[in-house]
Image (spheres, helix red, strand yellow):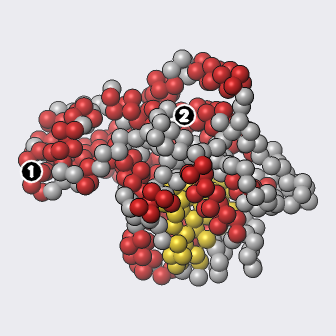
């Protein structure tokens, strides 16, 4: 239960080490010998399905990231007169205590256990073949995550042939079910993403309400900078006046975009895989309307990679706020984002206030939810060079994980449409 409790606490923001308290198992197995990692975290690795060649089941669901994890802060006012300013007022202690008590009641008295119970209930509601495929996907992803950072020598010493064979058998069975029922690995990845964030949406949104939807000042400054870049693209020559927020969650960055100058509500479109997150966003930020057109903010509960936004070149900027690493196919996500940008000046903004090292910790702790880390400058350059059709250039290079710059700035990458 150690790892389950750790990850659930991280999901719900109950830790003390990050922007919304998203505390993580952050031992970097990729930079340490695997034998040392297992020695330092034996209980965590005992959760693995293939430990000592015996199949085990683990509730490895929760991980942070999808849904933004950002919020507003008071700052420069922007937008036209009459545009509704989302509230970022912190609850008074009495109201916060009442809201927290009501939240606990909705989760059965324990946020961690209540979240796990909700996730489990959702999994049990799946059709049998989808549930079986999802369980196999989880097991295979855990095994792959365990062995990926190992040297050949470590793998031969620490992983038995029986463990490897069980993993390969599960992979074959998973692929067979996927082929028979026309499922993809993206579909299976999204099962865990959707159920996890559906289960925690109420808790995350309510906790954000209690603190006025604000982060620590150092983290908020990084989100504010990213949002300003996204909004600036809507004000440049040839602008369409549209921002797309991918993994919008409960609408956390809406106030920051408004503060940055997003002039009218109908300039914003947010998409999230979790319908519960989108419901929370609509409750908080969906009522404002453009006084001239009568149109308001759009929140979509759907898969970004498959959703039809109405054509290419329909946004000035696309922002991934603490979201890119949770998507099932990072390269395909950038490809689609680039297709949605207007030519000559459209921007893709990728921001994570806590930085690339934090995401690597998430990947190490739970490769089921977080398949990989954020791209380095070198990886961005390689992807852009391989895909001339994207017509992108790297305008702002991100800080490297574990660097002094990352400590000061977090992660910010900006790509511009040529």
Q: Is residue 110 left or right of residue 102?
A: left
Q: Is residue 31 left or right of residue 297?
A: left
- Residue in front for this viewpoint, 177 or 376: 376
**Could you say whether the residue bearing mark 2 is in a helix, strand or loop?**
helix
Q: Residue at x 59, y 82 (%)?
A: 418
Q: Quadrant of residue 400?
A: bottom left
In the image, residue 162 sits, relative to residue 380, either above or below, namely above
- Residue in front for this viewpoint, 167 or 296: 296
In the image, residue 236 sits, relative to residue 50, either above or below, namely below
- Residue in front for this viewpoint, 260 or 237: 260
Q: Which residue is mark 1?
A: 156
Q: Residue at x 39, y 33 (%)?
A: 6
Residue 297, horizontal then vertical, whole percent: 76, 52
Q: Residue at x 51, y 55 (%)?
A: 352
Residue 298 in sight: no
Q: Which residue is mark 2?
A: 200
Q: Earlier in the sequence, mark 1 or mark 2?
A: 1
Residue 250, horizontal then vertical, whole percent: 64, 43
Mark 2: give few (<14), some (14-19) or many (20+) Cα within 10 Å: many
Q: Quadrant of residue 124?
A: top left
């Amino acid at each position: 239960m150690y790892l389950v409790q750790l990850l659930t606490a991280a999901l719900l923001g109950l830790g003390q080490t990050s922007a919304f308290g998203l505390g993580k198992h952050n031992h970097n197995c990729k930079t340490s010998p695997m034998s040392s990692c297992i020695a330092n975290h034996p209980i965590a690795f005992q959760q693995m399905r293939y430990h000592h060649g015996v199949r085990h089941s683990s509730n490895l669901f929760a991980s942070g990231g999808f849904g933004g994890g950002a919020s507003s802060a008071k700052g420069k006012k922007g937008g036209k007169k009459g545009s509704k300013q989302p509230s970022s007022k912190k609850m008074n202690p009495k109201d916060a205590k009442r809201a927290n008590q009501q939240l606990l009641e909705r989760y059965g008295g324990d946020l961690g256990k209540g979240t796990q119970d909700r996730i489990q209930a959702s999994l049990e509601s799946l059709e049998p073949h989808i549930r079986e495929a999802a369980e196999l996907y989880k097991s295979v992803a855990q095994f792959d995550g365990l062995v990926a950072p190992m040297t050949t020598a470590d793998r031969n010493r620490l992983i038995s042939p029986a463990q490897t064979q069980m993993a390969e058998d599960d992979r074959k069975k998973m692929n067979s079910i996927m082929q028979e029922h026309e499922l993809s690995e993206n579909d299976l990845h999204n099962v865990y993403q959707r159920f996890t964030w559906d289960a925690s949406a109420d808790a995350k949104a309510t906790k954000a309400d209690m603190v006025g939807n604000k982060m620590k000042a150092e983290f908020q400054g990084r989100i504010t900078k990213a949002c300003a870049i996204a909004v600036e693209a809507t004000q440049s020559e040839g602008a369409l006046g549209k921002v797309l927020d991918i993994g919008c969650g409960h609408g956390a960055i809406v106030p920051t975009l408004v503060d940055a100058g997003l002039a009218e509500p109908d300039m914003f479109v947010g998409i999230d895989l979790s319908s519960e997150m989108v419901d929370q966003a609509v409750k908080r930020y969906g009522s404002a309307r453009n006084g001239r057109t009568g149109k308001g903010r759009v929140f979509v509960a759907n898969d970004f990679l498959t959703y039809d936004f109405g054509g290419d070149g329909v946004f000035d900027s696309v922002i991934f706020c603490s979201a890119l690493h949770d998507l099932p196919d990072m390269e395909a996500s950038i490809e689609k984002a680039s297709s949605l940008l207007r030519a000559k000046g459209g921007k893709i903004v990728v921001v994570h206030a806590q930085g690339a090292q934090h995401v690597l910790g998430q990947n190490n702790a739970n490769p089921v939810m977080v398949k990989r880390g954020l791209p380095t400058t070198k990886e961005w350059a390689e992807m852009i060079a391989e895909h001339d059709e994207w017509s992108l250039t790297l305008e702002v290079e991100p800080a490297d994980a574990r660097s002094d710059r990352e400590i000061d700035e977090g992660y910010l990458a900006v790509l511009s449409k040529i």
